[in-house]
Every structure is written in C-alpha cells, then in structure tokens.
C-alpha cells in the first residue's frame, strides 16, 4: 500500500468530506490530521462534525477533548474526555486523558479515579501508573504513590529512577 493512502494529506481528507459530508470517519481522520498539524481550531471543527453525525462516537468525543486541550479550553476538554470514557468504558486512553485533564486544572483528587480506571482497562499501561504515582504523591498518598512508581518502572525501565 502506498504511503499517501495510509496517511492522506489534509487536502485529500478535505476533499473526502466534501464528497460525502455525512462520512463521520472522514471527519475523524481530518480532525486527527489537523491535530498532528497543531491546528486545534480546524481539528475542533472536524470533531464537532463527527459528533454531530454520531453522538455515540467515543473517538469523536476523544478528538474534541484533544482539540479543546490544544486550545486550553479545559472545562470543555474534561467534558469531552468524560463522554468518551463513558461511551467506551474499556478504553484506557480515554480514562488516562481524563485523569491528565484533571491534573492540568489542578484537581488532583479527581484525577485518581480515571487513572485507576485506565489501569484497570489496561494493567500494563506504564505511563498511567507513572502519572497515578505522581497524583498520589501530590495528594499525600505516599504508599500508593510508591506502588505505582515501582509498577511503572517494572513495566517500562525508562521510568526507573
């Protein structure tokens, strides 16, 4: 398969959504492409179309969360990640990003549960263990912090002291 078919350009993706404005997958790909180009406004527009077409699309809500994050619109980011995690409860990345979002806004206690859910969905998620260790440290839960710090290092030696 050629590279352009695997990784279409933004122009190709824009053309795809113009040909079929009801194609949520095309908008999803376009939104992700805009995120890779660090264009949160255009990504937001594309992901809004995904959710307009399919309100139950967890990936669309997740994309909205990433776009809102890039635009520093944190309350909307949290709402979007909550919706993605609710729609797809076994999606570790949605829970992880919700936990990170709570960290960004300084709501460390609120970050704990989504990070734990991310780890429950994917027990070998080293980065989630590392971040949960930090959150536990920031909230004074030293024993839990140490456990997740060791688990992150076990899973990914790059996280060792």
Image (cartoon, rainbow, N blue to C red):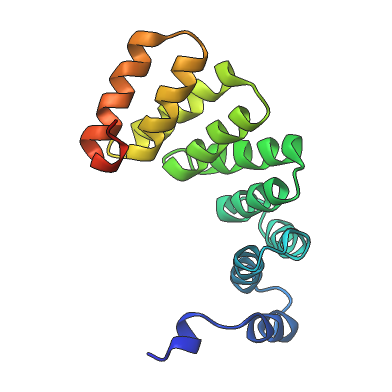
Whole-percent x, y for residue 152 in the image:
30, 33
Whole-percent x, y for residue 105 in the image:
68, 28
Q: Residue at x 69, y 41 (%)?
A: 77
Residue 93 visible? The answer is yes
Q: Quadrant of the N terminus?
A: bottom left
The answer to which image quadrant residue 125 occupies is top left
Is 47 placed left or right of 108 in the picture? right
- In the displayed structure, 68 sits above or below 76; it is below
Is 116 placed left or right of 147 in the picture? right
- In the displayed structure, 120 sits above or below 23; it is above
Nearer the observer, 3 or 30:
3
Is 149 placed left or right of 62 in the picture? left
Q: Residue at x 66, y 84 (%)?
A: 16
Whole-percent x, y for residue 114 in the image:
50, 28
Nearer the observer, 17 or 146:
146
Q: Residue at x 43, y 26 (%)?
A: 132
The answer to which image quadrant residue 110 occupies is top right
- In the displayed structure, 111 sits above or below 65; it is above
Q: Quadrant of the C terminus?
A: top left
Residue 91 visible? The answer is no
Whole-percent x, y for residue 108 in the image:
57, 20
Nearer the observer, 70 or 19:
70
């Amino acid at each position: 398969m050629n590279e352009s078919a695997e990784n279409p350009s933004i122009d190709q993706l824009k053309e795809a959504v113009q040909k079929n404005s009801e194609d949520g997958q095309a908008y999803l790909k376009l939104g992700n492409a805009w995120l890779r180009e660090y264009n949160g406004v255009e990504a937001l527009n594309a992901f809004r179309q995904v959710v307009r077409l399919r309100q139950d699309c967890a990936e669309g809500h997740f994309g909205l969360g990433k776009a809102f994050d890039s635009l520093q619109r944190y309350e909307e980011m949290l709402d979007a990640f909550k919706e993605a995690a609710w729609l797809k409860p076994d999606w570790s990345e949605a829970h992880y990003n919700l936990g990170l979002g709570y960290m960004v806004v300084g709501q460390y206690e609120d970050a704990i549960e989504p990070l734990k859910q991310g780890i429950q969905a994917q027990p070998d998620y080293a980065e989630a263990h590392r971040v949960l260790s930090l959150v536990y440290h920031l909230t004074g839960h030293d024993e839990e912090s140490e456990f997740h710090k060791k688990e992150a290092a076990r899973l990914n030696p790059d996280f060792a002291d």
